Amino acid sequence: MVDEQGRVSGQQFSEKPVLRLARKDILGIQEMSASEISLILDTAESFKEVSTREIKKVPTLRGKTVINLFYEASTRTRTSFEIAAKRLSADTINISTSTSSVAKGETLIDTAKNLEAMNPDCIIIRHSASGAPHLLARLMRVPVINAGDGAHEHPTQALLDLFTVREKKGKLAGLNVAIVGDILHSRVARSNIYGFTKMGAEVHLAGPRTMMPAGVEKLGVRWHSNLREVVPQADVIMMLRIQLERQGSGFFPTLREYSRFFGLNLEVLKEAKPEVLIMHPGPMNRGVEISPEVADGPFSVILDQVTNGVAVRMALLYLLVGGERETDRSSV
Ligand code: CP
Protein backbone atom coordinates (compact mmCIF):
# COMPACT_ATOMS: atom_id res chain seq x y z
CA MET A 1 0.00 0.00 0.00
CA VAL A 2 1.01 3.59 -0.58
CA ASP A 3 -0.56 6.00 1.91
CA GLU A 4 -1.86 9.52 1.27
CA GLN A 5 1.55 10.96 2.15
CA GLY A 6 3.11 8.79 -0.54
CA ARG A 7 4.90 6.46 1.87
CA VAL A 8 5.18 2.83 0.89
CA SER A 9 4.33 0.61 3.82
CA GLY A 10 4.46 -3.13 4.23
CA GLN A 11 6.84 -5.73 5.53
CA GLN A 12 9.81 -4.91 3.40
CA PHE A 13 9.61 -1.13 3.37
CA SER A 14 10.41 1.52 5.90
CA GLU A 15 7.96 4.40 6.15
CA LYS A 16 10.34 6.82 4.51
CA PRO A 17 11.15 6.29 0.85
CA VAL A 18 14.64 4.80 0.73
CA LEU A 19 16.65 3.98 -2.35
CA ARG A 20 17.15 0.27 -2.17
CA LEU A 21 18.57 -0.58 -5.56
CA ALA A 22 22.30 -1.11 -5.64
CA ARG A 23 22.64 1.00 -8.77
CA LYS A 24 22.20 4.57 -10.00
CA ASP A 25 20.70 3.64 -13.36
CA ILE A 26 18.43 1.07 -15.00
CA LEU A 27 20.24 0.16 -18.20
CA GLY A 28 19.48 -3.51 -18.73
CA ILE A 29 18.23 -6.72 -17.19
CA GLN A 30 21.49 -8.50 -18.03
CA GLU A 31 23.30 -6.87 -15.11
CA MET A 32 20.41 -7.13 -12.63
CA SER A 33 20.18 -9.76 -9.91
CA ALA A 34 17.06 -11.83 -9.24
CA SER A 35 16.68 -10.11 -5.87
CA GLU A 36 16.75 -6.66 -7.48
CA ILE A 37 14.09 -7.78 -9.96
CA SER A 38 11.96 -9.15 -7.10
CA LEU A 39 12.31 -5.87 -5.19
CA ILE A 40 11.10 -3.89 -8.23
CA LEU A 41 8.14 -6.24 -8.78
CA ASP A 42 7.20 -6.17 -5.07
CA THR A 43 7.37 -2.36 -5.08
CA ALA A 44 5.24 -2.21 -8.24
CA GLU A 45 2.60 -4.31 -6.47
CA SER A 46 2.34 -1.59 -3.83
CA PHE A 47 2.01 1.13 -6.47
CA LYS A 48 -0.55 -0.62 -8.68
CA GLU A 49 -3.41 0.27 -6.36
CA VAL A 50 -2.71 4.02 -6.68
CA SER A 51 -3.93 3.93 -10.29
CA THR A 52 -7.32 2.55 -9.20
CA ARG A 53 -8.04 5.47 -6.84
CA GLU A 54 -10.35 8.31 -7.74
CA ILE A 55 -7.45 10.71 -7.14
CA LYS A 56 -4.60 8.84 -8.81
CA LYS A 57 -1.77 10.75 -7.21
CA VAL A 58 0.60 10.45 -4.27
CA PRO A 59 3.15 13.10 -3.26
CA THR A 60 6.15 10.73 -3.20
CA LEU A 61 8.21 12.63 -5.79
CA ARG A 62 6.87 16.14 -5.22
CA GLY A 63 9.51 18.67 -6.26
CA LYS A 64 11.38 16.20 -8.48
CA THR A 65 11.77 16.60 -12.24
CA VAL A 66 11.74 13.71 -14.69
CA ILE A 67 12.80 14.18 -18.32
CA ASN A 68 11.57 11.86 -21.09
CA LEU A 69 14.16 12.07 -23.89
CA PHE A 70 12.83 10.08 -26.84
CA TYR A 71 14.87 9.80 -30.04
CA GLU A 72 12.50 7.13 -31.40
CA ALA A 73 8.73 6.86 -31.68
CA SER A 74 6.80 5.43 -28.75
CA THR A 75 3.19 5.22 -27.64
CA ARG A 76 3.25 2.96 -24.58
CA THR A 77 6.64 3.55 -22.96
CA ARG A 78 6.71 7.34 -23.17
CA THR A 79 3.12 7.78 -22.03
CA SER A 80 3.53 5.21 -19.29
CA PHE A 81 6.63 6.92 -17.88
CA GLU A 82 4.89 10.29 -18.01
CA ILE A 83 1.79 8.97 -16.24
CA ALA A 84 3.94 7.15 -13.67
CA ALA A 85 5.92 10.30 -12.87
CA LYS A 86 2.77 12.44 -12.69
CA ARG A 87 1.05 9.95 -10.37
CA LEU A 88 4.06 10.33 -8.07
CA SER A 89 3.64 14.16 -8.29
CA ALA A 90 6.92 14.70 -10.18
CA ASP A 91 7.18 17.39 -12.84
CA THR A 92 7.62 15.82 -16.26
CA ILE A 93 9.21 17.19 -19.42
CA ASN A 94 8.93 15.42 -22.77
CA ILE A 95 11.61 15.97 -25.38
CA SER A 96 11.44 14.45 -28.83
CA THR A 97 13.93 14.76 -31.67
CA SER A 98 11.57 16.67 -33.94
CA THR A 99 10.91 19.44 -31.39
CA SER A 100 14.38 19.79 -29.86
CA SER A 101 17.74 21.08 -31.05
CA VAL A 102 18.61 17.50 -32.00
CA ALA A 103 16.81 18.42 -35.24
CA LYS A 104 19.50 21.13 -35.71
CA GLY A 105 22.29 18.60 -35.30
CA GLU A 106 23.06 18.84 -31.57
CA THR A 107 24.85 15.73 -30.32
CA LEU A 108 23.50 13.36 -27.68
CA ILE A 109 26.31 14.36 -25.32
CA ASP A 110 25.65 18.10 -25.71
CA THR A 111 21.92 17.53 -25.29
CA ALA A 112 22.54 15.53 -22.12
CA LYS A 113 24.95 18.09 -20.63
CA ASN A 114 22.48 20.91 -21.31
CA LEU A 115 19.62 19.00 -19.76
CA GLU A 116 21.71 18.16 -16.70
CA ALA A 117 22.57 21.86 -16.32
CA MET A 118 18.86 22.40 -15.57
CA ASN A 119 19.12 20.03 -12.61
CA PRO A 120 16.59 17.29 -13.34
CA ASP A 121 16.31 14.25 -11.04
CA CYS A 122 16.03 11.51 -13.66
CA ILE A 123 16.47 11.11 -17.42
CA ILE A 124 14.58 8.45 -19.35
CA ILE A 125 16.01 7.82 -22.80
CA ARG A 126 14.96 5.86 -25.88
CA HIS A 127 17.47 5.79 -28.72
CA SER A 128 17.99 3.82 -31.91
CA ALA A 129 21.66 3.28 -31.04
CA SER A 130 22.48 0.40 -28.70
CA GLY A 131 24.46 1.75 -25.76
CA ALA A 132 23.18 5.35 -25.91
CA PRO A 133 21.69 5.16 -22.37
CA HIS A 134 24.97 3.71 -21.08
CA LEU A 135 26.90 6.66 -22.49
CA LEU A 136 24.50 9.08 -20.80
CA ALA A 137 24.69 7.19 -17.53
CA ARG A 138 28.48 7.51 -17.49
CA LEU A 139 28.29 11.25 -18.14
CA MET A 140 25.46 12.21 -15.81
CA ARG A 141 25.11 12.39 -12.06
CA VAL A 142 21.36 11.75 -12.14
CA PRO A 143 19.74 8.33 -12.67
CA VAL A 144 19.28 7.28 -16.30
CA ILE A 145 16.60 4.78 -17.31
CA ASN A 146 16.83 2.91 -20.60
CA ALA A 147 13.46 3.06 -22.38
CA GLY A 148 14.81 0.94 -25.25
CA ASP A 149 18.20 1.16 -27.00
CA GLY A 150 18.45 -0.16 -30.54
CA ALA A 151 18.23 -3.92 -30.67
CA HIS A 152 19.95 -4.20 -27.28
CA GLU A 153 17.60 -4.01 -24.25
CA HIS A 154 14.21 -2.71 -23.14
CA PRO A 155 14.47 -3.40 -19.42
CA THR A 156 11.26 -1.73 -18.26
CA GLN A 157 9.24 -3.71 -20.82
CA ALA A 158 10.71 -6.95 -19.46
CA LEU A 159 9.98 -5.88 -15.89
CA LEU A 160 6.33 -5.18 -16.71
CA ASP A 161 6.14 -8.52 -18.54
CA LEU A 162 7.59 -10.33 -15.51
CA PHE A 163 5.18 -8.45 -13.25
CA THR A 164 2.19 -9.43 -15.42
CA VAL A 165 3.13 -13.11 -15.51
CA ARG A 166 3.86 -13.22 -11.77
CA GLU A 167 0.53 -11.51 -11.09
CA LYS A 168 -1.44 -13.94 -13.27
CA LYS A 169 0.43 -17.16 -12.44
CA GLY A 170 1.51 -16.40 -8.86
CA LYS A 171 5.11 -17.36 -9.68
CA LEU A 172 7.85 -17.19 -12.30
CA ALA A 173 10.12 -20.09 -11.40
CA GLY A 174 9.37 -23.28 -13.27
CA LEU A 175 7.15 -21.68 -15.92
CA ASN A 176 7.61 -22.51 -19.58
CA VAL A 177 7.84 -19.27 -21.58
CA ALA A 178 7.79 -19.23 -25.40
CA ILE A 179 9.06 -16.11 -27.18
CA VAL A 180 8.15 -16.13 -30.86
CA GLY A 181 9.39 -14.13 -33.83
CA ASP A 182 12.24 -11.78 -34.65
CA ILE A 183 14.58 -12.36 -31.71
CA LEU A 184 17.57 -10.95 -33.61
CA HIS A 185 16.27 -7.38 -33.75
CA SER A 186 14.19 -7.44 -30.58
CA ARG A 187 15.36 -5.57 -27.48
CA VAL A 188 12.19 -6.83 -25.79
CA ALA A 189 13.18 -10.45 -26.44
CA ARG A 190 16.73 -9.91 -25.16
CA SER A 191 15.59 -8.30 -21.90
CA ASN A 192 12.91 -10.94 -21.39
CA ILE A 193 15.35 -13.80 -22.00
CA TYR A 194 17.59 -12.38 -19.26
CA GLY A 195 14.64 -11.66 -16.98
CA PHE A 196 12.74 -14.93 -17.22
CA THR A 197 15.85 -17.12 -17.00
CA LYS A 198 17.16 -15.20 -13.96
CA MET A 199 13.78 -15.73 -12.27
CA GLY A 200 13.93 -19.49 -12.87
CA ALA A 201 11.62 -19.86 -15.89
CA GLU A 202 12.46 -22.06 -18.87
CA VAL A 203 12.61 -20.02 -22.08
CA HIS A 204 11.95 -21.42 -25.56
CA LEU A 205 12.38 -19.37 -28.72
CA ALA A 206 10.53 -20.01 -31.98
CA GLY A 207 11.18 -18.27 -35.26
CA PRO A 208 13.15 -18.48 -38.48
CA ARG A 209 16.85 -19.27 -37.93
CA THR A 210 17.61 -16.05 -39.84
CA MET A 211 15.96 -14.13 -36.99
CA MET A 212 17.93 -15.80 -34.17
CA PRO A 213 21.12 -14.20 -32.84
CA ALA A 214 24.23 -16.34 -33.36
CA GLY A 215 24.92 -18.49 -30.31
CA VAL A 216 21.54 -17.72 -28.73
CA GLU A 217 21.61 -21.07 -26.91
CA LYS A 218 24.45 -19.68 -24.76
CA LEU A 219 21.79 -17.49 -23.09
CA GLY A 220 20.26 -20.63 -21.57
CA VAL A 221 17.34 -20.92 -24.00
CA ARG A 222 16.28 -23.42 -26.68
CA TRP A 223 15.51 -22.52 -30.28
CA HIS A 224 12.70 -24.23 -32.23
CA SER A 225 12.10 -23.84 -35.94
CA ASN A 226 8.42 -24.70 -35.57
CA LEU A 227 5.86 -22.71 -33.58
CA ARG A 228 3.78 -25.85 -33.02
CA GLU A 229 6.69 -27.39 -31.11
CA VAL A 230 6.54 -24.74 -28.36
CA VAL A 231 2.80 -24.03 -28.05
CA PRO A 232 1.57 -27.19 -26.24
CA GLN A 233 4.06 -26.89 -23.32
CA ALA A 234 3.94 -23.12 -22.93
CA ASP A 235 2.48 -21.40 -19.87
CA VAL A 236 3.19 -18.07 -21.57
CA ILE A 237 3.41 -17.28 -25.29
CA MET A 238 4.98 -13.92 -26.08
CA MET A 239 4.54 -12.86 -29.69
CA LEU A 240 6.96 -10.28 -31.10
CA ARG A 241 6.31 -7.64 -33.68
CA ILE A 242 7.51 -8.40 -37.16
CA GLN A 243 9.44 -5.30 -37.99
CA LEU A 244 7.73 -4.41 -41.24
CA GLU A 245 10.45 -1.89 -42.01
CA ARG A 246 12.82 -4.87 -42.39
CA GLN A 247 10.60 -6.77 -44.80
CA GLY A 248 12.56 -7.32 -47.99
CA SER A 249 15.85 -7.61 -46.08
CA GLY A 250 15.90 -11.33 -46.73
CA PHE A 251 14.99 -12.52 -43.24
CA PHE A 252 11.91 -14.35 -44.58
CA PRO A 253 10.39 -14.68 -48.05
CA THR A 254 7.00 -12.97 -47.60
CA LEU A 255 4.80 -11.74 -44.78
CA ARG A 256 2.19 -14.30 -45.81
CA GLU A 257 4.66 -17.12 -45.45
CA TYR A 258 5.91 -15.80 -42.11
CA SER A 259 2.36 -15.59 -40.84
CA ARG A 260 1.59 -19.12 -42.01
CA PHE A 261 4.53 -20.63 -40.11
CA PHE A 262 4.92 -18.32 -37.11
CA GLY A 263 1.62 -16.45 -36.74
CA LEU A 264 -0.50 -17.25 -33.70
CA ASN A 265 -4.13 -17.83 -34.68
CA LEU A 266 -7.07 -19.72 -33.18
CA GLU A 267 -6.11 -22.90 -35.02
CA VAL A 268 -2.63 -22.99 -33.46
CA LEU A 269 -3.98 -21.86 -30.09
CA LYS A 270 -6.17 -25.00 -29.91
CA GLU A 271 -2.99 -26.90 -29.02
CA ALA A 272 -2.16 -24.60 -26.08
CA LYS A 273 -2.73 -25.24 -22.37
CA PRO A 274 -6.17 -24.09 -21.18
CA GLU A 275 -4.65 -21.43 -18.88
CA VAL A 276 -2.00 -20.12 -21.29
CA LEU A 277 -1.18 -16.39 -21.25
CA ILE A 278 -0.79 -14.59 -24.59
CA MET A 279 1.48 -11.54 -24.49
CA HIS A 280 2.69 -8.95 -26.97
CA PRO A 281 4.74 -5.84 -26.15
CA GLY A 282 3.07 -3.82 -28.90
CA PRO A 283 2.74 -2.33 -31.37
CA MET A 284 1.03 -5.36 -32.97
CA ASN A 285 0.73 -6.22 -36.64
CA ARG A 286 -2.72 -7.76 -36.50
CA GLY A 287 -3.03 -10.61 -38.95
CA VAL A 288 0.73 -11.06 -39.26
CA GLU A 289 2.31 -12.37 -36.03
CA ILE A 290 -1.00 -12.53 -34.17
CA SER A 291 -4.60 -12.81 -35.35
CA PRO A 292 -7.13 -10.27 -34.02
CA GLU A 293 -9.15 -13.13 -32.45
CA VAL A 294 -6.13 -14.17 -30.36
CA ALA A 295 -5.02 -10.61 -29.55
CA ASP A 296 -8.49 -9.75 -28.24
CA GLY A 297 -9.35 -13.23 -26.95
CA PRO A 298 -9.75 -14.59 -23.42
CA PHE A 299 -6.11 -15.68 -23.03
CA SER A 300 -4.67 -12.31 -24.01
CA VAL A 301 -3.07 -10.18 -21.26
CA ILE A 302 -1.77 -7.59 -23.72
CA LEU A 303 -3.65 -4.67 -22.19
CA ASP A 304 -2.82 -5.88 -18.66
CA GLN A 305 0.83 -5.50 -19.69
CA VAL A 306 0.15 -1.86 -20.54
CA THR A 307 -1.72 -1.23 -17.27
CA ASN A 308 1.08 -2.85 -15.27
CA GLY A 309 3.69 -0.75 -17.08
CA VAL A 310 2.57 2.29 -15.10
CA ALA A 311 2.95 0.51 -11.73
CA VAL A 312 6.38 -0.88 -12.66
CA ARG A 313 7.61 2.54 -13.82
CA MET A 314 6.26 4.19 -10.67
CA ALA A 315 8.24 1.62 -8.68
CA LEU A 316 11.42 2.32 -10.64
CA LEU A 317 11.11 6.08 -10.25
CA TYR A 318 10.43 5.63 -6.54
CA LEU A 319 13.41 3.32 -6.08
CA LEU A 320 15.80 5.52 -8.08
CA VAL A 321 14.63 9.04 -7.33
CA GLY A 322 12.62 8.84 -4.11
CA GLY A 323 14.17 9.28 -0.70
CA GLU A 324 17.72 8.92 0.35
CA ARG A 325 20.46 6.58 -0.66
CA GLU A 326 21.07 3.63 1.62
CA THR A 327 24.62 3.44 2.91
CA ASP A 328 24.58 -0.34 3.14
CA ARG A 329 23.51 -1.76 -0.19
CA SER A 330 25.22 -5.10 0.18
CA SER A 331 21.96 -6.85 1.03
CA VAL A 332 20.53 -6.34 -2.47
N1 CP B 1 6.35 -1.81 -26.02
C1 CP B 1 6.83 -0.63 -26.46
O1 CP B 1 8.01 -0.32 -26.26
O2 CP B 1 5.92 0.15 -27.09
P1 CP B 1 6.22 1.65 -27.61
O3 CP B 1 7.20 1.54 -28.73
O4 CP B 1 4.87 2.18 -28.04
O5 CP B 1 6.79 2.41 -26.45
Image (cartoon, rainbow, N blue to C red):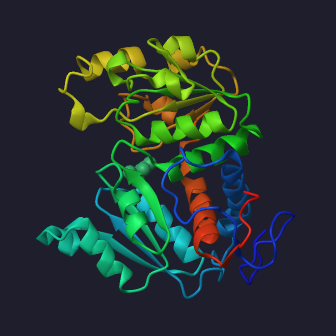
- Residue at 26 percent across and 19 percent down: it is 252
Q: Quadrant of residue 100?
A: bottom left
Image side of residue 179 versus residue 171, left or right? left
Count of marks placed on residues? 0
- Residue at 34 percent across and 35 percent down: it is 185
Q: Quadrant of residue 328?
A: bottom right
Q: 301 or 54, which lies in front?
A: 301
- Up the image or down, 106 lies above or below 279; here it is below
Q: Is residue 178 visible?
A: yes
- Up the image or down, 20 lies above or below 17; here it is above
Residue 128 location (% of width, % of height): 29, 51
Image side of residue 298 versus residue 45, left or right? left
Residue 76 location (% of width, % of height): 44, 56
Q: 85 or 119, which lies in front?
A: 119
- Quarter of the image that includes the N terminus: bottom right
- Quarter of the image that includes the C terminus: bottom right
Residue 267 location (% of width, % of height): 51, 15
Q: Which residue is most to the right?
A: 11
Q: 43 or 221, which lies in front?
A: 221
- Up the image or down, 87 lies above or below 28; here it is below
Residue 14 location (% of width, % of height): 81, 73
Q: 161 or 12, which lies in front?
A: 12
